[in-house]
Amino acid sequence: MCGITGYCGPRPAAKVLLEGLKRLEYRGYDSAGICVAEEEGLRLIKREGKIRRLIEKVPTNIKGNTGIGHTRWATHGRVNDLNAHPHLDCSGNIALVHNGIIENYSGLKEKLESEGHVFLSETDSEVIVHLVEKFYQGSLEEAVKEALALLKGTYGIVCMHRDHPGLLIGARNGSPLVLGVGNGEMFLASDVTAIISYTKAVVYLEDGEVVTLTAAEYKTTDLSDREIEKKVEAVSWELEEIEKGGYSFFMEKEIFEQPEAIKRGVSGRIDLEQATAHLGGLNMSNRDLLNIERVRITAAGTSYYAGMVGAYLLESVARVPCTVELASELRYRNPIVERNTLHFAVSQSGETADTLYALRELQRKGATVLGICNVVGSSIARESDGGVYIHSGPEIAVASTKAFTSQITVFYLFAMLLGRMRHLSYEAGLELAHELQAIPTRVEQILAKQKSIKELAAKYAHYKNFLFLGRGINYPVAMEGALKLKEISYIHAEGYSAAEIKHGPIALINEETPSFFLVPDDGLKEKVISNMKEVKSRGGRILAVAVEGENSLNNIADDIIEIPKLKNGLFYPFLMVVPLQLFAYYCALDLGRDVDHPRNLAKSVTVE
Ligand code: AGP
């Protein structure tokens, strides 16, 4: 999604802006630009392509200590220099960057053109800077507020004016914007990764808020000029957490961080004395929890598959009926919200528009919605009625890996908590607690197989189509494995219930379409093996993730990745997903893909 940076202070603005944009590259983009206030006027440099191409165009003698920057992920208008941000007004005195979608931009643009404004780009964003120009009569803040009042849609913006070189105006409505409070300098950005190398003191803007800042101070108001008191918060991350730390790609780093991330997610949340879990932040009493009669989970992408695992757990461990629905579908389905139903919105970024709007629709109907997020202070985290942070640490790669295992960790904990309030015995609760605490070590054992998985990927990376097949609690893992492969290697892959392939997909089976089966030694193992035989008998190539020593597969599967045997089959999703993450990663490497920034994708999809 688009990235925004802004700076006001003693440093050379261009350097700060470009460094910030580099830290936001992971959000996905196709063009970039900066604008700096120099004595002679605003200096605008913007270009299609990666930031390194932009840097080539930035003159070494660029001066100016106030500026704005942007990485664009195209929604309206082609990918080219003109459509890149920042955008200027007709006079060239006002510059603005925008993240979001202005839904009523075409009417506004027609009116502005009829009043003589000349547009250079095809974007919706450019209407904002011309509106500011229209309303500007000396106060940039007032002009921005008047312009924003006419907009329908979402925005995160930063605006500057050549006549106010030490001033920036930022505002948000639906697209994130965070203020970094420095010592004699101020920063604005789409998220903290662009700020924390300078300051960890941040202020998260809420929808409808405007921040007016100079190097020395800032003021937050709403669009009607009412002052808003905002808390300065401390970012808990360290800078190195958003560096690659010696790995080739953030995705590789984050796959290998999973044992630590799962440990962090469990830490302080298991009560061995009561054989249950403690989850702060739910904002629900035990009585509230006891009154829960059903759960509904909503999310997108990988988070949706984590929610599917969560649903199996809640029904199996806590015996609470649970459904999972795609946020983009739920939002427009006029959902039925019943009493005593607990809703979860699952989102790593906490900014996914589909999930955020589904949350708002559910709350509009009176639902209690808990957020399961990774990014502290994100929109979903702040707007939900409570929730649980997954504490996986910043996930920079577009392909979500450690967030998935950290999200399901939270569902294991929540299932224990609810289960032990109902029928789950002390012994059963204790067994779950011990199994969960042992998972990081088990995951490490699988990560140690990276070399053999890399060799397997090299053997299969040339195939054009894959099926990923699992049953029960591992069916969502098959879906996730297919998503991983397709989104970073661009190989077509479909996840399916292993049983379901005989109802159609088996027509796809031939030598050129390998099938990846998940074969845990749980109650469904024999069923999965018979599905494998159906594929084998039709000449399909078979890869399998199976428990160590599962010799019955030797004459069926062409290749097997072995995982440790578990006492409780409910925990296999942790162990099944890691080989699929590594397989996808190494296939993508083999094919020379830009693993951390796959084409067409963004880390956080903040548009519908
Ligand atoms: C997963 O690898 C993708 N990046 C994508 O499906 C992602 O999971 C989805 O966009 C949801 O993102 P969120 O968890 O930040 O809401």
Image: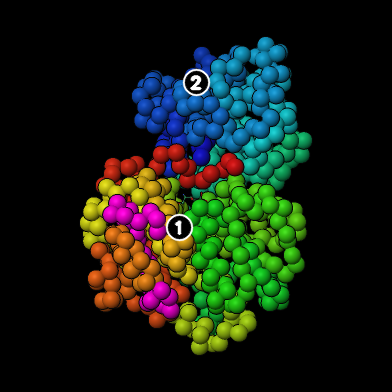
Residue 416 belongs to magenta span? no
Instruction: Establish whether ligand 1 lies closer than 8 Å to the Cβ of label 1.
Output: no
521 falls in the magenta region: yes
**As drawn, 218 above or below 59:** below
- Indicate which label's residue lies in the foreground, 2 or 1: 1
Residue nearer the viewer, 108 or 145: 108
Instruction: Kindly identify the amino acid type of the residue bearing the numbered disc 1.
Output: Gly
Q: Position of residue 66 (x, y in %)?
A: 52, 27
Q: In this view of the protein, can residue 140 be seen by the observer?
A: no
Q: Are marks 2 and 1 in contact (CB under 8 Å)?
A: no
Q: Nearer the viewer, residue 229 or 309?
A: 309
Instruction: Identify which residue, 310 or 31, lies in the foreground.
Output: 310
Q: Residue at x 70, y 24 (%)?
A: 107
Q: Secondary structure at mark 1?
A: loop
Residue drawn at (72%, 21%), measured in percent from left and top?
135
Position of 103 with respect to 536 (left or right) is right
List the residue tagged with mark 2. 82
The quadrant of the rendering that contains the C terminus is: top right
Neighbourhood count class around disc 1 (C-alpha, 10 Å): few under 14, some 14–19, many 20 upward? few
Percent position (x, y) of residue 4? 52, 35
| Kind of residue indicated by mark 2 | Leu
- Residue 578: percent from left, percent from top: 36, 62
Query: How did the renderer colour the structure?
Result: rainbow
Instruction: Find disc 1 in the rendering and name its residue.
Output: 504
Residues in magenta, as a range: 506-527
Query: Is 259 above or below relative to 494?
Result: below
